[in-house]
Amino acid sequence: MTRAALAASVLVALSGCTAGAPAPSASTATPAREVSSASPSPGAVPRPVHPVGDPVVIASGLAAPWSILRIPGGGTLISERDTTLIRELRGDGSLRQAGVVADARPGGEGGLLGLAFLPDTAAPGGTGWVYAYFTADVDNRIVRMPLGGPAGQRTLGAPEPVLDGIPRAGNHNGGRIAFGPDGLLYATAGDAGNGANAQDLDSLGGKILRMTPTGRVPAGNPFGTYVYSYGHRNPQGIAWDSRGRLWASEFGQSTWDELNLITAGANYGWPIVEGQSDHEVFVNPLVQWSTDQASPSGIAIVDDTIFMAGLRGERLWRIDPSSGEAGDWFVHSYGRLRDVVPGPDGTLWFVSNNTDGRGTPAPGDDRLYQVEVAP
C-alpha cells in the first residue's frame, strides 16, 4: 500500500485513555540507602533476570511523579507532572526541590513529563545538561538546563530550547526522552488525541523523534526530518538493549497495548491497526496485552531483560525479548506504576503514580521503590 493510500485510510476518532482505580499502596518501609551503580564486567554475557524478594521504599510523598533520572556519579532527579517541580532524592530518602519548569502547563495527561541527562564538562556548572519534555501553552516541547552543584545540592539553570511544535492535547502527549547509544536524543510523541497525526509524516505527533543534543535533525534520519518511526498512538517508554536495539512501550486504545522493537522509518500501524495484524506494511509488536493488564509507561532494560511499568494494570511486567515470554510481578500491590529504571548494584527502581487523578492514593503516596533482580 502506498503512503498516500495509508493516509486516506486513517481512522479519526479515538477516545481518551481510561484507567481503573488501584488498590492502596503498601505502607512505607525503611528507606533504602542509595549507592553508586556497579559497572558490568567487560565482555559479560547478559543473563535474564527477574525480581527477587519484596520491594523497599526509597522515598515517599511524591506528587504524580513521571520520570526517574539517575545522574551518573551520584544523585537522582524525579519530575512531578502537575507541580512541574524537579525534585532531588537525597541519600537518606528525603526530597528537595532542584528546579521547576515554569513554562509547563499541567492539564489532563500533560505537564512536566520525561527527563534525560547528557554529561558535558563544557556546560555551565561543569557537569552536564538535564533535558525535560513538557506540555506548554500551545505545544509539547523539549528544553535543556545546566546541572550544577554536588549530589544532594543539585541546581538547574535557565532552560534552553531544544525542540518545540510537538502536538499537545489533554491526552496522548507521549513524553519519554532518552539518549541512545549513538549519542542522539530520542523522544516519544503521542498523537495528541488525533489518530491522523500518527500517519502524517509532516506532523511530529504519533512518532518517535530523533535529534542532536542541540535540537537539530541528525544525518541518517529516514525522512530527513525529526521523525524516526511513525504510526504510534501514545508511546511512553524507550530503552536500548546490549545490541543497541531500541524498544518502546505503547498505549493502545481499547484492545491492545504493545511492546515494539523500533527500526528507522518503520510504520507501527496506528490508527489503522491496533496490536498485531497480517498487514505487511505495518510492524507487529513483539508482545501485546489487553489494556486492563498493562497501559504501559516507562520501560527499563537490565541484562537484556525488559521491565515495563503498568498503570491501569497496576503491575510490573518482565519480558524476555529473545522469546517474547512475559510475566508480571506485584499485581495490585502498589497501585499504578509510571516509570522504571535500572537501580544500583543489581536492583530495579520503580515509582507509583496513584496521585495523578486516576488512582486511589494511600497515605504517603506516591513512592519510589527498589527491588533486587537476579537470574
Image: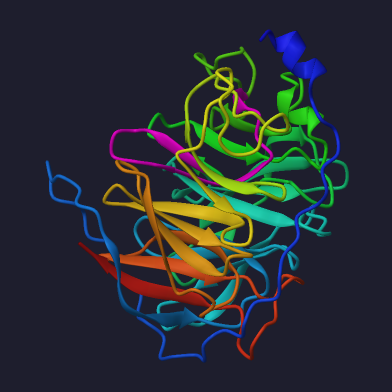
* Horizontal side of residue 42 vs 102, given as left or right: left
Q: In this view, does 366 lie above or below 247?
A: below
Residue 174: percent from the left, percent from the top? Answer: 67, 45
Residue 279: percent from the left, percent from the top? Answer: 59, 22
* Horizontal side of residue 23 vs 73, given as left or right: right
Residue displayed at 67% across by 32% down = 273
Which range is magenta? 227-250
Residue displayed at 58% across by 55% down = 297
Residue 351 in view here: yes
Between 325 and 44, the residue placed more toward the observer is 325
Q: In this view, does 228 lie above or below 241?
A: above
Between 174 and 231, the residue placed more toward the observer is 231
Between 131 and 272, the residue placed more toward the observer is 272
Q: Is residue 218 magenta?
A: no
Q: Is residue 243 magenta?
A: yes
Residue 267: percent from the left, percent from the top? Answer: 60, 23
Residue displayed at 52% across by 91% down = 27
